[in-house]
Image (spheres, grey):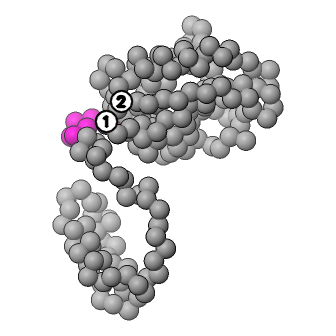
Amino acid sequence: MSPSESQYYDKKSLRCITGRTADWAEIAKDCVAFANAKGGRLAIGIEDLEEQPPAAQRVEAAMVDRVRKRLRELTVNVEAHPELVTAPNGGMFVDVLLPRATSVASTSDGRYFIRIGDESRPVLGEEILRLANERASIPWETLAAQGVPRERVDASKLAAFMSQIQASGRVKESVKEKGSSLNRVGKPGL
């Protein structure tokens, strides 16, 4: 079964890449959005409200090469890995793996997008510069938790981190208002 559309997964009809209804620009937009966020998968051949492709749906093997070629033409800094997949019901679709880009990804006509929730949203103005500056770093939210119990947290390191968060112009006020979780382990809050 396919998961619901999310930050990491989207479904598109096979019509998006075949016939007169082909909308390669929409596919390129979603690929750029995944590459600029945390990566993801695009299942081409599964309708929005369905979990699997139609049971009778067949996709020619040559379509995988066509998807790879078109995405190379329509995107910049996007690494796309399409693969032909047969679902449990026998229907076929193209599954495109999209890792996080190491450089800022865009469409070949200079548009930028990022995946937020289940949407591919445009990135404009100063946000493009911010996206470029963050490319060289590893997003902290993707790192695995180290499993350190609260009792073993280094209070001075946490205080320094909290101070930096409070001083940052890029952190929402609602986050700054939350304060420190140190109060929960019997140490002074910030």
Q: In which quarter of the view is residue 12 placed?
A: top right
Identify residue for label 2: 77
Quadrant where the C terminus lies? bottom left
Please tell me which residue is depicted at 30% across the width and 77% down the height of the picture: 158
Q: Position of residue 56 (x, y in %)?
A: 80, 20
Measured as percent of width and height from the top left, residue 17 is found at 56, 16
Query: In the orientation shown, which residue stands out farthest toward the bottom?
Result: 186
Residue 121 in view here: no
Type of residue at label 1? Val
| SS under mark 1 | loop
Quarter residue 129 falls in: top left
Is residue 19 or residue 69 the one in the foreground? 69
* Res 171 → quadrant: bottom left
| Residue 172 drawn above or below residue 68 | below
For disc 1, the marked residue is 104
Query: Which span is picked out in magenta?
Result: 122-129
- Quadrant of the rendering where the N terminus is positioned: top right
Q: Nearer the viewer, residue 130 or 139?
A: 139
